[in-house]
Image (tube, rainbow, N blue to C red):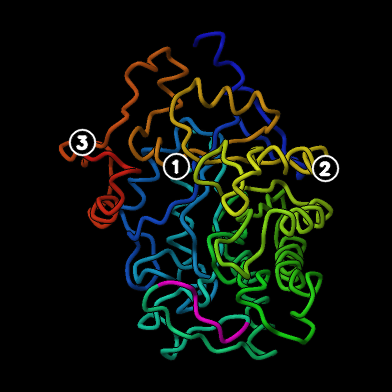
């Protein structure tokens, strides 16, 4: 290993006491490769096995906490006890070489697929459609449904514990349900769950509390809680970076293990306020980095770029596209073989890279992100 890359390989102890063997995690990416019951498939296990050898932890694709909460029909489920055996295989597969296994939990809310929902209806904080072509108008959730959803995150956490995962990540980003409650665009409620910034924060905080209760009741060893969030929204009435920083300040007091900032580019500034060019990740790190570890992501592919990102003081980084194209990214950097890291995705190498057919088909829809050759 070259001396300049040593920062990548420093271990890191999370607030819960769980230790990561290095600073690089595999980012959560939907791979659409479970079966229609939400059960992990052999192809999915092979995909994760190929990429878990070198990283400090793997954050899985998002797993549904209730039936019908997915965007894709063939997504991982954590909504039924019958899925625990498959989840156990997944956790064991990830942990073979010392990586920690973190299960990402979510519900799609209004941007799910009505065809896959429980009763043909989409649920959200309010009956407001997403600003995208053909978006369905969701039904505003009742108090009973909100409480059921909160409990579902706790139950999914219990299943993750029983399956042998080292932690969970709450998916509060990318426009999914947890973010929908936080957003003034999608949350027009005037009850205890909306109407003010503080009340819009109540649902994600209740989800965090539900997860904590499950950990206290079922975990016998330290267990990781991460939270992923999007720093701003594109909708005119959506939240901006300033609003999100208010929420981040609250999140920093929740005894979480990390905050995962969902970015397309690690160094990006605000896309709502183009004059605000300071990297959003720096704003988050400066505000709460002394209280909770911050994780960055977005467009990092070379070891030089990863070291430069760590030099900002952000202690953890997740790699997505880079690990899809090069499962052995960490190992090659460690062995001084960084020149051999793939920067394209050759179709001829699909089997060698253990990329499931459905996932490979999806990757072809994003040629700018995945240069398939």
The mark nearer the N terminus, 2 or 1, is: 2
Q: Which residue is mark 2?
A: 291
Q: Nearer the viewer, residue 282 or 72?
A: 282
Q: Are marks 3 and 1 in contact (CB under 8 Å)?
A: no
Element under disc 3: loop
Looking at the image, residue 334 lies above or below residue 262: above
Q: Nearer the viewer, residue 85 or 18?
A: 18
129 inside magenta stretch: yes
- Magenta-highlighted residues: 126-132
Residue 281: horizontal and vertical position, in percent?
Answer: 65, 40
Looking at the image, residue 100 lies above or below residue 223: above
Q: What kind of secondary structure does the magenta stretch mostly adopt?
A: loop
Give the distance between the C-alpha atoms of the residues marked 2 and 1, in whole angstroms. Answer: 26 Å
Residue 372: horizontal and vertical position, in percent?
Answer: 23, 40
Q: Which residue is mark 1?
A: 320
Residue 3: horizontal and vertical position, in percent?
Answer: 56, 8
Element under disc 2: loop
Q: Nearer the viewer, residue 199 or 94?
A: 199
Let me know if residue 132 appears in the view: yes
Residue at 25% over, 50% down: 364
Residue 83: horizontal and vertical position, in percent?
Answer: 46, 68
Give the distance between the C-alpha atoms of the residues marked 3 and 2, in whole angstroms. Answer: 42 Å
């Amino acid at each position: 290993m070259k001396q300049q890359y040593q920062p990548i390989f420093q271990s890191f102890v999370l607030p819960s006491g769980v230790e990561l063997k290095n600073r690089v995690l595999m980012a959560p990416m939907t791979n659409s490769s479970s079966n229609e019951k939400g059960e992990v498939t052999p192809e999915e296990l092979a995909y994760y096995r190929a990429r878990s050898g070198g990283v400090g932890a793997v954050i899985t694709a998002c797993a549904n906490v209730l039936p019908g909460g997915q965007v894709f029909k063939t997504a991982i489920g954590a909504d039924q006890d019958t899925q625990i055996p498959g989840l156990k295989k997944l956790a064991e597969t990830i942990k073979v070489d010392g990586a920690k296994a973190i299960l990402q939990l979510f519900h799609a809310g209004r941007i799910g697929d009505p065809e896959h929902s429980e009763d043909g209806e989409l649920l959200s904080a309010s009956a407001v459609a997403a600003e995208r072509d053909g978006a369905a108008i969701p039904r505003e959730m009742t108090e009973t449904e909100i409480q059921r959803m909160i409990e579902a995150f706790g139950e999914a956490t219990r299943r993750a514990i029983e399956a042998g995962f080292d932690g969970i990540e709450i998916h509060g980003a990318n426009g999914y349900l947890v973010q929908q409650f936080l957003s003034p665009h999608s949350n027009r409620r005037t009850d205890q769950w909306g109407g003010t910034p503080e009340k819009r924060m109540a649902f994600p905080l209740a989800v965090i509390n539900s997860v904590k209760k499950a950990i206290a009741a079922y975990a016998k060893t330290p267990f990781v809680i991460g939270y992923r969030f999007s720093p701003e929204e594109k909708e005119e009435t959506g939240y901006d970076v300033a609003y999100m920083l208010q929420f981040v300040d609250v999140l920093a007091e929740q005894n979480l293990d990390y905050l995962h900032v969902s970015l397309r580019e690690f160094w990006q500034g605000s896309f709502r306020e183009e004059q605000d060019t300071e990297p959003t990740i720096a704003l988050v790190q400066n505000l709460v980095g002394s209280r909770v570890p911050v994780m960055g992501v977005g467009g990092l592919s070379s070891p030089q770029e990863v070291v430069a990102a760590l030099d900002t003081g952000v202690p953890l980084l997740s790699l997505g596209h880079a690990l899809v194209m090069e499962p052995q990214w960490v190992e090659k950097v460690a062995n001084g073989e960084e020149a051999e890291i793939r920067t394209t995705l050759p179709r001829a190498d699909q089997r060698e890279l253990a990329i499931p057919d459905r996932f490979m088909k999806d990757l072809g829809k994003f040629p700018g992100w995945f240069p398939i050759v």
